[in-house]
Image: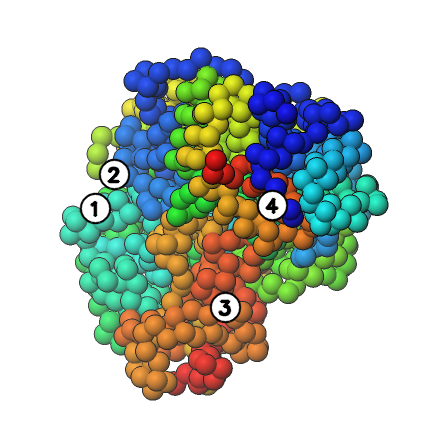
């Protein structure tokens, strides 16, 4: 595959991963989505993950609600507690607050590259960061590496650890492993 | 996972692009980004000051400004234009930033698809949440009547929904913790004595003496309140503190009366009888404004110094010393009315006593006395009042608690929930209150909640009670909404008289899908068939309309840096129709003592100590438990124990203990021991609001001991129906061993 094509694939993968971390809704978490995810895992030869994911997929309606409960519990509010808030700030600062200085730094990075969020929201959410990686992978691969190094990788492994420890369903562990795979720095 | 495959290798070989379903097909068309030309550094907007903030970390509501950078609130400060708190705010006020950005804050409407108490939350749309609330509450109303709905509101934003359910839906079953578990008794007792609720309106800066009965300013921090107190001390006022514990105020006192808990009314009667018997009261004032003085004089004549001394366990000479100090400085004395006064179930009589003492000393409308500020008038806008009759009013049906604060005593509501008598209560709206911690006897509260057909909670944070909701709604915090009109005068009456008006305006935009109470209430009202009765379409409109009554608007206030200041009025002087009902015939007709009377409370059983609780200067009870900054300032609530008792028990500072009460209820969590001579042997003390059992409070959970769990014996104040919460007895438990507290 040409380098250009490789880049296109990476852009699409980042967009796909960003989508996957959004709140599960029937309008995107459908058969088409699952078949794409299946293809991706097959291509990666992640057979174990594929098995885990496909087994409970028999009843899609139930699974959607289960995933919604799981997403809420892990990323929004939950008992025993918000297990893995998907924001850089929570991991970057000792007080574990949302919208800390790192969020401001992230916003500034977006601004310097000519982008801002389309609505008033906290800029260091994982969905935004993955979407931004897609934009950069497309337009400025060097900046993409820089963003990963300075802003994404310092917190993502800590987040991933929490998701892996706290998840009850296989979906999000597979997702964070995928994100890890496509963002991890590799030696040349 | 096939770790042998690297990303690079994968991308080189993958046939994804050629797959039947390309990745791009399953992602939404738009990202969360828009293109925006980069503004180079140097021309970046600096930190801006957003004015018009009103703090809500406690009810005092200081005026604040926010330092905002790129839409992010970075710091809170007092509004320099304020003539109340000025530039100062307290630790809690500062920590509002942490509340705003707490990762545990409620963010989206959620539905419980698990069970009450053991919830499984799922994020839902506002549409679904409102449909559910509207239809379920309507169903309760249709099946059981409006009185089948109970409401537990707290805070400024809960007024609008509270009025909706009371005035439009027509339920009497509304219970505010701030009344029934806090200040309601004070207000109704003062109304029954001097015709007005007192607030904390004593002119401390100009006082020559101040009397605090349990009031522990310094541990209880409200900025302008403290400024008044400290100015009084600075100006040389004598301070008398009556408290079983050497509180922060006691530490600054001239006389510390180490009183036996529960006997305060006896102490007041003794002081008053001494003043009357020795003609050391303000005869002229009493003749002019007093009513029923002869009955009063006769009614308290038994309360000699020796009688008081014996009951209160303080020297007769000290009671005399207090009386003499008050008489010598009268009428310029501040008899502080207190704030949280629901202590022993004999509290209405004590509060009547404080009001009578104020009158006896002529300390009304004079420098240093009880003086109400003359603030500006601003008309409130809310749901139109409707008459729904008293037919289903639980208090009237029970024919008791005739001096109940507005609303229905919590106890009567809960009783009806659990027994279904006199009628079932099956709907529950909880707005900013945490009845698991505000109301004693948690088991019964949980029982009441579990039998409901529908429970909705609205809050900014998850609290214990939110675990029992079917629908949980995220409200804008006080930093993100319009609502409260704060008005008043300059803090020190000795300064030029001025009035101020300010309105809470958002310092930053709300994040996630948080909504304000006007929006939420209106949406519910529409779905319950009351859309035509909605008084205002939005919170901005409400505030603007209210300000218009004072010739102001939100825009005008913003031009004036958030606070409008105008010339004020001299607050001194006694109002023309002022009267002190030393003896109140109506009270007697309703079956209670018409002259302030001491009613003994249960004695401490052998081996136990009375559990006392109070405030921390850095916390607002459980509301701030999860705030990291405040948590770090005071992570737990050490239990105070008398040093001699501790020595006998082999306890030392820092030992870990749990508690068990006289009914066998154990604390779930533990705390440390604070050994001190500053507490009586018959009592132990902890700060209230710790030991949350809600694991969603990631910071506060399990830290310190929750006193509320140990308050299982309910004392109900007969006149008001409010709860007395200091009649529970505990033993300490160390390393599994239950320790008998020595007498």
- Using residue A49 as the reference point, say whether residue B698 is left or right of it: left
Label 3 vs 1, first from the N-terminus: 1
Which chain does the numbered disc 3 sit on?
Answer: B
User: Where is mark 3, residue-wise?
Assistant: B669
- Residue B198, relative to residue B533: is it above or below? below
Image location (x, y in percent) of residue B207: 22, 49
Marks 4 and 1 belong to one chain = yes
Q: Nearer the viewer, mark 3 or mark 1?
A: 3
Image location (x, y in percent) of residue A39: 74, 35
Helix, strand or loop status at disc 1: helix
1 and 2 marks in contact (CB < 8 Å): yes
User: Where is mark 1, residue-wise?
Assistant: B231
Residue closest to the far top: B37
Which chain does the numbered disc 4 sit on?
Answer: B
Most foreground residue, B486 or A32: A32
Image location (x, y in percent) of residue A67: 71, 44
Q: Which of marks 3 and 2 is in front?
A: 3
User: Where is mark 4, residue-wise?
Assistant: B4
> CA separation, marks 1 and 2?
9 Å
Most foreground residue, B531 or B359: B531
> CA separation, marks 4 and 1?
75 Å
Q: Nearer the viewer, mark 4 or mark 1?
A: 4
Image mark count: 4
Which chain does the numbered disc 2 sit on?
Answer: B
User: Where is mark 2, residue-wise?
Assistant: B492
Marks 4 and 3 belong to one chain = yes
Residue B565, by quadrant, is top left
Marks 4 and 2 belong to one chain = yes
Q: Residue at x 76, y 41 (%)?
A: A64
Label 4 vs 2, first from the N-terminus: 4
For disc 3, the neighbor class at 10 Å (few under 14, some 14 to 19, many from 20) is some
For disc 1, the neighbor class at 10 Å (few under 14, some 14 to 19, many from 20) is some
């Amino acid at each position: 595959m040409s380098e250009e094509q490789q880049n296109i694939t990476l852009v699409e993968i980042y967009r796909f991963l960003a989508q996957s971390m959004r709140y599960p809704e029937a309008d995107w978490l459908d058969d088409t989505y699952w078949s794409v995810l299946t293809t991706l895992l097959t291509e990666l030869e992640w057979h174990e993950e594929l098995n885990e994911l496909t087994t409970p997929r028999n009843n899609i309606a139930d699974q959607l609600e289960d995933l919604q409960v799981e997403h809420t519990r892990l990323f929004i509010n939950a008992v025993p507690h918000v297990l893995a808030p998907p924001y850089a700030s929570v991991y970057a600062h000792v007080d574990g607050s949302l919208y800390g200085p790192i969020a401001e730094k992230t916003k500034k990075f977006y601004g310097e590259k000519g982008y801002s969020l389309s609505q008033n929201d906290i800029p260091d959410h994982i969905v935004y960061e993955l979407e931004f990686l897609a934009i950069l992978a497309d337009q400025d691969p060097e900046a993409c590496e820089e963003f990963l190094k300075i802003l994404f990788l310092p917190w993502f492994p800590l987040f991933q650890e929490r998701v892996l420890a706290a998840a009850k369903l296989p979906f999000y562990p597979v997702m964070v492993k995928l994100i890890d795979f496509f963002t991890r720095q590799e030696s040349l | 996972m096939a770790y042998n495959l690297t990303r690079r290798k994968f991308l080189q070989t993958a046939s994804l692009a050629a797959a039947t379903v390309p990745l791009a097909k399953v992602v939404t068309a738009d990202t969360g980004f828009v293109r925006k030309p980069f503004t180079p550094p140097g021309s970046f907007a600096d930190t801006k000051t957003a004015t018009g903030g009103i703090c809500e970390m406690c009810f005092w509501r200081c005026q604040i400004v926010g330092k905002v950078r790129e839409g992010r609130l970075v710091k809170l400060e007092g509004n320099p234009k304020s003539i109340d708190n000025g530039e100062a705010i307290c630790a809690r006020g500062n920590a509002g930033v942490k509340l705003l950005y707490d990762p545990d804050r409620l963010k989206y409407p959620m539905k419980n698809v698990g069970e009450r108490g053991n919830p499984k939350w799922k994020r839902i749309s506002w549409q679904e949440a409102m449909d559910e609330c509207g239809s379920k509450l309507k169903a309760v109303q249709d099946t059981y009547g409006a009185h089948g709905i109970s409401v537990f509101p707290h805070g400024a934003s809960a007024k609008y929904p509270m009025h909706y359910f009371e005035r439009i839906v027509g339920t009497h079953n509304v219970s505010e913790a701030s009344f029934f578990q806090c200040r309601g008794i004070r207000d109704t007792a003062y109304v029954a004595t001097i015709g007005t609720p007192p607030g904390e309106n004593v002119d401390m800066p100009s006082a020559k003496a101040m009397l605090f009965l349990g009031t522990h300013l310094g541990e209880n921090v409200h900025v302008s309140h403290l400024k008044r107190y400290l100015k009084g001390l600075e100006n040389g006022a004598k301070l008398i503190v009556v408290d079983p514990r050497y509180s922060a105020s006691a530490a600054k006192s001239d006389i510390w009366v180490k009183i036996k808990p529960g006997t305060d009314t006896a102490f007041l009667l003794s002081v008053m009888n001494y003043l009357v018997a020795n003609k050391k009261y303000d005869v002229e004032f009493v003749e002019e404004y007093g009513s029923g003085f002869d009955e009063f004089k006769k009614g308290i004549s038994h309360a000699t110094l020796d009688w008081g001394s014996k009951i209160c366990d303080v020297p007769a000479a000290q009671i005399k010393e207090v009386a003499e100090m008050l008489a010598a400085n009268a009428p310029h004395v501040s008899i502080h009315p207190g704030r949280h006064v629901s202590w022993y179930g004999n509290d209405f009589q004590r509060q009547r006593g404080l009001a009578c003492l104020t009158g006896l000393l002529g300390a009304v409308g004079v420098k240093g006395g009880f003086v109400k500020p003359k603030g500006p008038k601003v008309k409130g806008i809310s749901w139109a009042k409707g008459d729904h009759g008293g037919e289903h009013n639980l208090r009237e049906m029970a024919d008791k608690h005739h001096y109940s604060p507005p609303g229905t005593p919590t106890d009567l509501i809960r009783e009806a929930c659990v027994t279904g008598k006199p009628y079932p209560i099956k709907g529950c709206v909880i707005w900013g209150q945490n009845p698991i911690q505000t109301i004693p006897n948690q088991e019964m509260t949980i029982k009441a909640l579990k039998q409901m057909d529908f429970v909705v909670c609205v809050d900014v944070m998850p609290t214990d009670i939110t675990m029992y909701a079917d629908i949980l709604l995220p409200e804008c915090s006080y930093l993100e909404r319009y609502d409260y009109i704060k008005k008043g005068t300059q803090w020190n009456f000795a300064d030029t008289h001025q009035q101020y008006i300010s309105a809470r305006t958002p310092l930053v935009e709300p994040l996630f899908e948080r909504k304000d109470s006007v929006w939420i209430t209106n949406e519910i009202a529409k779905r319950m068939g009351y859309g035509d009765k909605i008084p205002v379409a939005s919170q901005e409109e409400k505030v603007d309309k209210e300000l218009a009554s004072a010739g102001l608007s939100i825009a005008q206030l913003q031009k004036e840096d958030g606070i409008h200041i105008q010339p004020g009025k001299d607050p001194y002087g006694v109002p023309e129709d002022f009267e002190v009902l030393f003896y109140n015939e109506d009270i007697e007709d309703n079956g209670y003592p018409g002259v302030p009377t001491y009613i003994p409370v249960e004695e401490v059983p052998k081996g136990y100590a009375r559990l006392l609780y109070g405030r921390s200067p850095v916390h607002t009870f459980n509301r701030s438990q999860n705030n990291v900054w405040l948590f770090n300032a005071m992570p737990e609530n050490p239990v105070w124990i008398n040093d001699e008792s501790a020595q006998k028990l082999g306890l030392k500072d820092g030992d870990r203990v749990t508690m068990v009460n006289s009914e066998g209820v154990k604390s779930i969590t533990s705390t440390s021991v604070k050994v001190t001579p500053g507490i009586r042997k018959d009592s132990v003390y902890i700060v209230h609001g710790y030991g949350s059992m809600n694991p969603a409070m990631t910071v506060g959970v399990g830290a310190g001991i929750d006193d509320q769990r140990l308050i299982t014996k309910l004392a109900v104040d007969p006149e008001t129906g409010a709860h007395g919460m200091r009649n529970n007895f505990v033993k300490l438990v160390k390393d599994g061993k239950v320790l008998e507290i020595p007498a």
